[in-house]
Image (cartoon, rainbow, N blue to C red):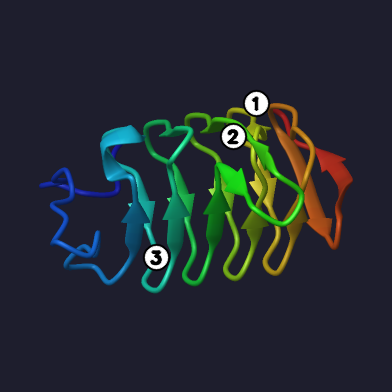
């Protein structure tokens, strides 16, 4: 069941900003599933692809990078259906976050997160496994 009665695909201005005050560089490489919600002041770099599944919740001030110029890594980021990403978290290139997984606020995610897992911290570590 959707959190939104009238969910709409975002539209981007010339700077990549949406009316909900989140921004995506290379938004042509962003796939956003219906019913997903991205919080204000979040930043997405989709140069190498960002795929966000249906009913995903992303808190405010989250940064998602498909490219890291510091260590020259890159790769598609995938966030699967029903996952939740806490505010101020950072997702690195090439990471997949599994279905219904939860990333706690202020986490740094450098490795894949299995479906149903709950992770948190810098760098994110498993806390528990949720029933799916």
Relative to 96, 12 lies left or right:
left
Is the residue under label 2 in contact with that under label 1 (CB below 8 Å)? Answer: yes
Q: Please name the residue shown 55% across and 60% down the image.
A: 63
Quadrant in the picture for residue 22 = bottom left
Please report the residue visible at 13 percent of the width from the left and 61 percent of the height from the top: 13
In the shown orientation, is residue 39 left or right of residue 16? right
> How far is mark 1 from mark 2, CA to CA?
7 Å
Residue under the point 76% across and 49% down: 71
Kind of element beneath mark 1? loop
| Closer to us: 74 or 91 | 74
Q: Nearer the viewer, residue 21 or 126?
A: 21
Q: Quadrant of residue 12?
A: bottom left
Element under label 3? Answer: loop
Q: Residues within 10 Å of mark 1 (few under 14, many from 20)?
A: few
State the mark number for residue 2: none
- What is the C-alpha distance between the residues marked 3 and 1? 24 Å
Please name the residue that numbered disc 3 is placed on: 39
Residue 131, above or below 88: above
**Numbered marks: total:** 3
106 w.r.t. 126: above or below = below
The residue indicated by pointer 2 is: 100
> What residue is at 74 percent from the left and 35 percent from the top?
113
Instruction: Mark 3: give few (<14), some (14-19) or many (20+) Cα within 10 Å.
Output: some
Q: Which dot, 3 or 1, sits closer to the camera? A: 3
Q: Position of residue 62 (x, y in %)?
A: 53, 64
On the image, the x and y values in percent for residue 53 come to 42, 31
* Residue, disc 1: 132
Q: Which of disc 2 and disc 3 is earlier in sequence?
A: 3
The reply to whether residue 110 is visible in this rendering is yes
């Amino acid at each position: 069941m959707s959190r939104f009665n009238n969910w709409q695909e975002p539209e981007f201005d010339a700077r990549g900003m949406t009316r909900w005050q989140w921004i995506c560089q290379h938004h042509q490489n962003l796939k956003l599933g219906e019913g997903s919600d991205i919080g204000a002041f979040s930043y997405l770099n989709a140069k190498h692809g960002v795929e966000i599944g249906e009913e995903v919740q992303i808190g405010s001030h989250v940064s998602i990078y498909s490219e890291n110029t510091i260590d020259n890594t890159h790769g598609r980021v995938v966030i699967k259906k029903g996952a939740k990403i806490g505010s101020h978290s950072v997702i690195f290139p090439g990471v997949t976050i599994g279905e219904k997984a939860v990333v706690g606020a202020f986490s740094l995610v450098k490795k894949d997160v299995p479906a149903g897992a709950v992770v948190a911290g810098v760098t994110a570590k498993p806390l528990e496994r949720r029933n799916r």
